[in-house]
Amino acid sequence: MTTSETAPTERSDDPPLPPGPTSYPGVGNTIGFLRDPFAFYDGLREYGDVVSYSVAGEDFCTLLHPEHVERVLVTEESKFGKSEFIREAGEKFIGNGLFASEGEFWRRQRTMMQPAFYRERIGTYAEPMVAFAAETADSWDDGEAIRLQQVMKRLTLRILATALFDHDVRGADSSIHDAARGIARAINEKSDAGSVDSLLPDWVPTATNRRYRRAITRFDEAVERLIDERRDEPPGDDFLSILLHATDDRGEGMSDEALRDELATFLFAGHETTALALTYCLYLLSNHPRVRRKLNDELDSVLDGDAPTMADLRALDYTDKIVTEALRRYPPAYVVFRETKQDVILGGYTIPEGTSLTLPQFVIQNDDRWFDDPETFDPDRWTPEMKADLPDYAYFPFGGGPRHCIGMRFANAEIRLVLATIAQRVEFDTTTDELDLRMGTTLEPTNPIEMTVKTR
Ligand code: HEM
């Protein structure tokens, strides 16, 4: 078999194309990527900070320097669009929702939805965040074994559904809840980076694709019923109500189709990510007794047994550092994807128009050029001096620029309030010594993390 090294290639006066690993005729780097995506990403570092390769017939370029991340997401963002292959992968479910849409439509939708994420509005969700977390922790017996990620997913979906639809999903009609869980499972199964299914189009009749399509149909039916019920109701405080009554600068509201796509997008983007952040925080705490003791001291002295509120978050400085550090070590959204809309010169290389860019948080945030001893979980590293010295975009768990996570404030409040509420009540022992992770739509544990509850 002949091979071709994608070494820098001269093209007239332009800077060369980026270097990259050996690419095989017909398959490019697909086999190496599928075999072990983590080892593949790790191997990219030896080619520098701008690295090209090809997977499943798609030309990719990975950027590993914070300066490049800033240029793509912020300072030169108009040269980059959402990646076409990600849009296609999510098209059936998230449609033209905020995550995937572009241009004027995206701007209009983002402006209409922004009020749902104002600080005051997030404050109204704090109470259910804390109440549901307390209920979950109080339901555990001392010595009980739980599967952490599964429990956190149920909790964050319940919180999100309350914020989105003012609908406690344990209530009488749980169809939207079941549909959302079904779709989350189907999407994860379909998007495992180590599986061939992740590279096949939706129409290929595999068992995974059939499950995915069925889950979408169930979700669409549940959302349609919900929108029908709510169209004629007076405005409420939840996100759906805000969207149902929002108008753009020409006084026009959202179509049912746009509403459906936004609800799918928010359910998709907003519950597994926060569930994973909480899973990693609680897992890391169970393995780091010194950090856990410091957290207990802070919770006892700041809260003195009371439930945490939004107003307490400012004083919960160590809790904040734990969350910040967990999101650094294990970022649930582990790669930001973009596509070049024109030829772009970055780091001394030409990246041709139409190239898919990956900006991997999980590599950059664990790079020893920006973080000392990056594999160590050390919340104390986040001193004011360290933050002042850290290059912008060496840490970007919520992305950056105009397309940064619209749910960031919601997620930041939720993770801290839920963590404080659970940690006030229980500690955990774990038998899982090392995390085995997989790259799906999110960075998630391959196997369930078993925890044993110890009431405090
Ligand atoms: C720990 C939790 C979360 C993490 C790590 C996270 C991460 C991210 C990242 C990295 C992006 C940027 C993607 C890109 O630029 O291509 C993003 C966008 C987005 N996130 Fe989040 N997210 C979280 C929670 C949430 C929540 C709670 C919601 C909703 C309630 C949400 C809704 C969205 C939406 C709608 C977008 C697309 C925004 C746009 O393009 O205008 N996220 N998120």
Image (cartoon, rainbow, N blue to C red):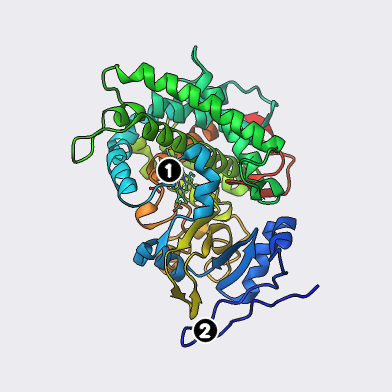
Give the numbered dot on residue 412. 1
Amino acid at dot 2: Arg
Left or right: where does residue 265 sit relative to residue 54? left
Badge 1 marks a residue whose secondary structure is helix
Left or right: where does residue 302 sit relative to residue 51? left
- The x and y percentages for residue 86 are 52, 51
Q: Say if disc 2 is inside 8 Å of ligand 1.
A: no
- Measured along the vertical axis of the image, is residue 194 above or below residue 348? above
Q: Residue furthest top?
A: 172
Instruction: Report the quarter where the N terminus lies.
Output: bottom right
Q: Counting other residues with Cα less than 10 Å from the Cα at mark 1, is it few (<14), some (14-19), or many (20 or more)?
A: some
- Measured along the vertical axis of the image, is residue 225 above or below residue 328? above
Q: Is 6 in front, or is 363? A: 6
Q: Counting other residues with Cα less than 10 Å from the Cα at mark 2, is it few (<14), some (14-19), or many (20 or more)?
A: few
Give the numbered dot on residue 35. none
Amino acid at dot 1: Asn
Q: Is 201 in front, or is 443? A: 201
Q: Residue at x 53, y 58 (%)?
A: 361
- The x and y percentages for residue 107 are 30, 48
Q: Residue furthest bottom?
A: 13
Say which residue label 2 marks: 11
Counting residues from the N terminus, which is met first, the one under dot 2 or under dot 1?
A: 2
Q: Does residue 315 appear in this view?
A: no
Q: Residue at x 59, y 70 (%)?
A: 52
Badge 2 marks a residue whose secondary structure is loop
Q: Does residue 110 appear in this view?
A: yes
Query: Exactly how many numbered labels are in the figure?
Result: 2
- The x and y percentages for residue 263 are 42, 33
